[in-house]
């Protein structure tokens, strides 16, 4: 192993073993949650713009927006908020939190698969009006679910610093 690669490896190893507070893990989880919502909302919007350019005489773009918001609202209430609560409770139970534990390892694998699938679907949808609308509905619904369920972070006061957090 070359010295540069070895140095990078050692730095990464130290980072993965670094101890942090559970409060910090919750903030990292919230930031990734919001980032995902913002990225997917933006991507869904771009797909809808492309669909509208393809067929400006059609009004299905508005139906896609409403559908994505409604489906996302249901996902937020019945799926994502439950998942968010469980993750925050899991973080509270960690004995010696490490920086990579703000989500379970399986979640990161699932996230990588979803990102790749999203990229593939978006590329396949180009120049196909119906496909663009459907992928946009998917993206907007997940974005809405992420942003809509994020109230859990606020409800559990993830963004407020308490004195007890400094002793985690």
Image (cartoon, rainbow, N blue to C red):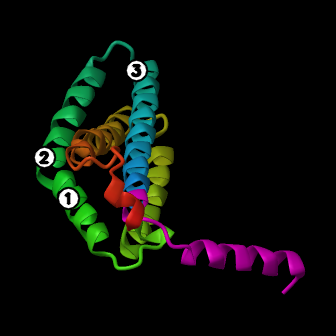
- The answer to which of 137 and 58 lies nearer the viewer is 137
Image quadrant holding the C terminus, namely bottom left
Check residue 52 in the rendering and tell me which mark sits there, or answer none: 3
Q: Verify whether residue 5 appears in magenta.
A: yes
Extreme-top residue of the structure? 57
For residue 149, above or below residue 21:
above
Residue 10 place in picture, x, y as percent: 72, 79
Q: Nearer the viewer, residue 60 or 151?
A: 151
* Residue that sits furthest to the right in the current view: 3
Which numbered marker is on residue 77?
A: 2
Q: Residue, x 36% and y 72% (percent of image)?
A: 104
Question: Is 3 drawn above or below residue 113 in the view shown?
Answer: below
Mark closest to the chain's N terminus, 3 or 1:
3
Pointer 3 or 2: first along the chain: 3
The residue at the point 35 percent across, 44 percent down is: 159
Residues rendered magenta in the picture: 1-24
- Looking at the rendered structure, the secondary structure element under dot 3 is helix
Q: Position of residue 79 (x, y in %)?
A: 16, 55
- How far is disc 3 from disc 1 in space, using C-alphas? 38 Å
What is the C-alpha distance between the residues marked 3 and 2? Answer: 30 Å
Q: Nearer the viewer, mark 3 or mark 2?
A: 2
Q: Residues within 10 Å of mark 1 (few under 14, many from 20)?
A: some
Q: CA distance from mark 2 to mark 1?
A: 12 Å
Dominant secondary structure (helix, strand or loop) of the stretch shown in magenta: helix
Q: Secondary structure at mark 2?
A: helix
In this rendering, would 53 be left or right of 77?
Answer: right
Q: Nearer the viewer, residue 17 or 87?
A: 17
Q: Which mark is residue 85?
A: 1
């Amino acid at each position: 192993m070359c010295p540069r690669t070895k140095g990078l490896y050692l730095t990464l190893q130290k980072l993965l073993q670094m101890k942090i507070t559970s409060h910090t893990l919750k903030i990292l989880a919230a930031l990734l949650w919001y980032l995902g919502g913002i990225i997917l909302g933006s991507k869904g919007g771009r797909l809808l713009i492309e669909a509208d350019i393809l067929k400006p005489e059609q009004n299905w773009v508005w139906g896609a927006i409403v559908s994505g918001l409604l489906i996302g609202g249901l996902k937020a209430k019945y799926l994502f908020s439950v998942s968010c609560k469980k993750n925050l409770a899991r973080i509270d139970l960690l004995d010696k939190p490490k920086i990579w534990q703000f989500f379970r390892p399986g979640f990161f694998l699932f996230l990588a698969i979803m990102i790749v699938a999203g990229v593939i679907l978006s590329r396949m949808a180009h120049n196909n009006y119906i496909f663009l609308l459907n992928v946009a509905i998917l993206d907007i619904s997940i974005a809405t679910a992420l942003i809509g369920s994020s109230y859990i972070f606020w409800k559990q006061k993830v963004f407020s610093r308490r004195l007890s957090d400094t002793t985690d």
